[in-house]
Image: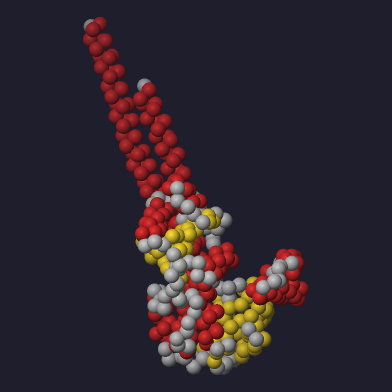
């Protein structure tokens, strides 16, 4: 019967889909682990830089650095990190929603945003909404290299120092733990003197008794060099964080898809069996009815 | 620590910790010239220039190219933070030569241009030298 054959066909199709989603889940798991170890590898550098900044700021008080000053330009630079590929659940949607509402909030204060979007998905979203983006970056793949991020960071630092923009922030999916990521807006510039990272607090605590360094050149000029480096590495960390979150999101989405396909197969099998049974019963009834008529 | 005359040396880039070892001697390019460090150095924070980094341990020697950054010495720990650290064996001599040609062709009008150009030239020259010396 047509109905039964249709059910068999559909079940086959769902099985194939399940195979694909399961493979994608496995791939995402492998990539997540690689991305996670890459993200972890950036930690020593960040911690050391934070430690140095703490050491130096205790040695050189009242440092005025252009990166710390606020200016009143009516523009702001926003960097949005989205993914290059889809099929990762709510990952892009969440980041982009936060990004657009942030841009709208800035616009409400009379500040225009220069938006730089990384990743095809984000670029597509912005063009769908008809919003202007200043720059779209699609050549950063899933293993971001520091040398790829550096020019972006330097360009932003330049614009900030020239006073073209009053702030620089990054919107990305922050990786909190393997089970939790959330879209986050990180203000990169002006550098806040209160550091938000826990690593810095530890470094400040640890370095308190250790300010008898010999500095070459003097602490002030060292700090001048160190602050841009801090900005660059923070931006780099956003990229690595975003990559890790993306793989987790894809892993979760594909796990859900695989499970849903499994459920669907069970349901279809049940339906098919019932249809088969009904069919047999009908045939039996036909035969019995025919026999009775003859007898 | 096996040997009293060694100290912990770590070379860290934003991407990874490139090298962690117990060194007996480290020479690095400071911003104002090369500096050599042995164990027991007083605490120091110093800016780095572009150049070659030598790390000597009991058994081996490492030669690397580093591009700016900072060095911190505290107690028996030496940390080199640099945005780029390349093992001498990994340097591509041809790429470095092309980089040198490109660097020489860079504009040289403003002060910023001049700094960028001389840095690029220096970077390429040192890489070529390191590639040849291995």
Find residue A64 and report its horizontal and vertical position in percent: 48, 82
Q: Is residue A267 left or right of residue A160?
A: left
Quarter-of-image position of residue B40: bottom right
Quarter-of-image position of residue B2: bottom right
Give the camera-side residue of A32 and A241.
Answer: A241
- Vertical order, A280 against A180 (above or below): above
Give the camera-side residue of B50 and B110.
Answer: B110
Give the camera-side residue of A84 and A124.
Answer: A124
Looking at the image, the residue that sits furthest to the top is A294
**Residue at figure coordinates x 33%, y 30% from the top left:** A272
Q: Is residue B11 visible?
A: no
**Residue at figure coordinates x 67%, y 79% from the top left:** B51
Find residue B13 and report its horizontal and vertical position in percent: 56, 73
- Vertical order, A117 against B30 (above or below): above
Check the image and tell me how it is coloured.
secondary structure
- Vertical order, A8 against A221 (above or below): above
**In the picture, which quadrant includes the C terminus of chain A?**
top left
Find residue A196 and report its horizontal and vertical position in percent: 39, 74
Q: Is residue A48 left or right of residue B24?
A: left
**In the picture, which quadrant includes the N terminus of chain A?**
top left
Q: Is residue A96 visible?
A: yes
**Residue at figure coordinates x 39%, y 78% from the top left:** A194
The total of numbered circles placed on residues is 0
Quarter-of-image position of residue B11: bottom right
- Vertical order, A204 against A286 (above or below): below
Give the camera-side residue of A218 and B4.
Answer: A218
């Amino acid at each position: 019967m047509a109905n039964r054959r249709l059910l068999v066909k559909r079940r086959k199709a769902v099985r194939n889909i399940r195979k694909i989603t399961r493979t994608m889940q496995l791939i995402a798991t492998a990539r997540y682990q690689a991305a996670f170890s890459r993200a972890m590898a950036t930690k020593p550098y960040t911690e050391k830089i934070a430690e140095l900044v703490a050491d130096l700021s205790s040695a050189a008080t009242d440092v005025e650095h252009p990166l710390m000053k606020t200016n009143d330009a009516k523009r702001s630079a926003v960097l949005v990190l989205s993914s290059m590929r889809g099929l990762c659940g709510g990952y892009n949607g969440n980041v982009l929603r936060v990004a657009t509402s942030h841009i709208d909030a800035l616009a409400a204060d009379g500040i225009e945003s220069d938006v730089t979007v990384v990743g095809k998905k984000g670029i597509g979203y912005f063009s769908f909404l008809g919003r202007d983006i200043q720059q779209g970056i699609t050549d950063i793949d899933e293993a971001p290299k520091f040398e790829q991020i550096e020019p972006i960071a330097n360009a932003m630092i330049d614009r900030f120092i020239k006073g073209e923009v009053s702030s620089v922030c990054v919107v990305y999916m922050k990786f909190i733990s393997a089970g939790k990521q959330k879209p986050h807006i990180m203000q990169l510039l002006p550098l806040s003197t209160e550091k938000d990272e826990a690593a810095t607090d530890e470094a400040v605590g640890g370095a308190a008794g250790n300010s008898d360094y010999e500095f070459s050149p003097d602490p002030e000029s060292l700090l001048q060099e160190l602050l841009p480096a801090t900005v660059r590495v923070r931006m780099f960390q956003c990229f690595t964080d975003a990559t890790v979150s993306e793989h987790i999101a894809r892993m979760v989405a594909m796990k859900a898809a695989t499970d849903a396909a499994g459920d669907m197969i069970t349901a279809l099998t049940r339906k098919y069996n019932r249809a088969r049974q009904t069919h047999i019963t009908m045939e039996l009834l036909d035969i019995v009815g025919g026999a009775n008529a003859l007898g | 620590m096996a040997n009293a005359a060694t100290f912990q040396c770590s070379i860290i880039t934003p991407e990874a910790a490139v090298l962690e070892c117990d060194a007996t001697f480290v020479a690095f390019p400071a911003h104002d010239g090369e500096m050599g460090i042995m164990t027991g150095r007083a605490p120091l924070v110093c800016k780095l220039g572009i150049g070659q980094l030598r790390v000597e341990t009991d058994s081996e020697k490492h030669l690397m190219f580093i591009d700016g950054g900072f060095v911190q010495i505290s107690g028996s720990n030496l940390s080199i933070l640099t945005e780029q650290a390349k093992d001498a064996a990994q340097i591509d001599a041809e790429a470095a030569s092309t980089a040198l040609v490109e660097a020489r062709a860079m504009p040289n009008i403003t002060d910023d241009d001049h700094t960028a150009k001389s840095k690029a030239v220096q970077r390429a020259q040192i890489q070529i030298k390191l590639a040849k010396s291995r």
